[in-house]
Amino acid sequence: QVQLVESGGGLVQAGGSLRLSCAASGSIFNINLMGWYRQYSGKQRELVASITRIGTTNYEDSVKGRFTISRDNAKNTVYLQMNSLKPEDTAVYYCSAGIVSSSVLVNYWGQGTQVTVSS
């Protein structure tokens, strides 16, 4: 049984910062790509940032220079440091991880955490 648990969301004023964390636990052999997605109300989930096991990162254009994704492989944890937050960053944020367990690769999702940026 594998689980992703997110933390760090909340309410912040525009220009402020938040740090999201997502820890994987359970029967884990290896974790490949990890990422953060966000979902606006009534919209599809979209990729915000991703990071490979060796640290190669990818960002959605609107967050480049403001958000930083990182991971700690020893702790099976991925982070999203969000700076210079804007009201349009308000969404539910989900972490995702491709986890190898019992020789099978499965993509898992966290439960989601609300980020609200007030103007």
Image: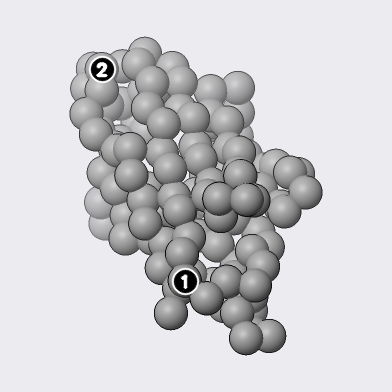
Nearest the camera: 89 or 53?
Answer: 53
* Residue that badge 1 annotates: 26
Callout 2, which amino acid?
Answer: Gln
Residue 103 position, x and y percent, is 68, 85
> Is 82 situated left or right of 73 in this image?
left
Per the image, label 2 sits on a secondary structure element best described as strand
Nearest the camera: 96 or 38?
Answer: 96
The answer to which of marks 2 and 1 sits earlier in the sequence is 2
Quarter of the rendering occupied by the N terminus: bottom left
Residue 27 position, x and y percent, is 52, 76
Q: Nearer the viewer, mark 2 or mark 1?
A: 1
Quarter of the rendering occupied by the C terminus: top left
Nearest the camera: 67 or 21?
Answer: 21
Q: Residue at x 32, y 60 (%)?
A: 111
Q: CA distance from mark 2 to mark 1?
A: 36 Å
> Is 92 situated left or right of 2 in this image?
left
Residue 85 position, x and y percent, is 39, 22
Per the image, label 1 sits on a secondary structure element best described as strand
Characterize the local packing of mark 2: few (<14), some (14-19) or many (20 or more) Cα atoms within 10 angstroms: some
Q: Residue at x 65, y 59 (%)?
A: 33
Callout 1, which amino acid?
Answer: Gly
- Is residue 40 among the parts visible in the rendering? no
Which mark is drawn over residue 94? none
Quadrant hosting residue 12: top left
Q: Residue at x 61, y 44 (%)?
A: 72
Characterize the local packing of mark 1: few (<14), some (14-19) or many (20 or more) Cα atoms within 10 angstroms: few
Which mark is drawn over residue 13? 2
- Is residue 111 among the parts visible in the rendering? yes
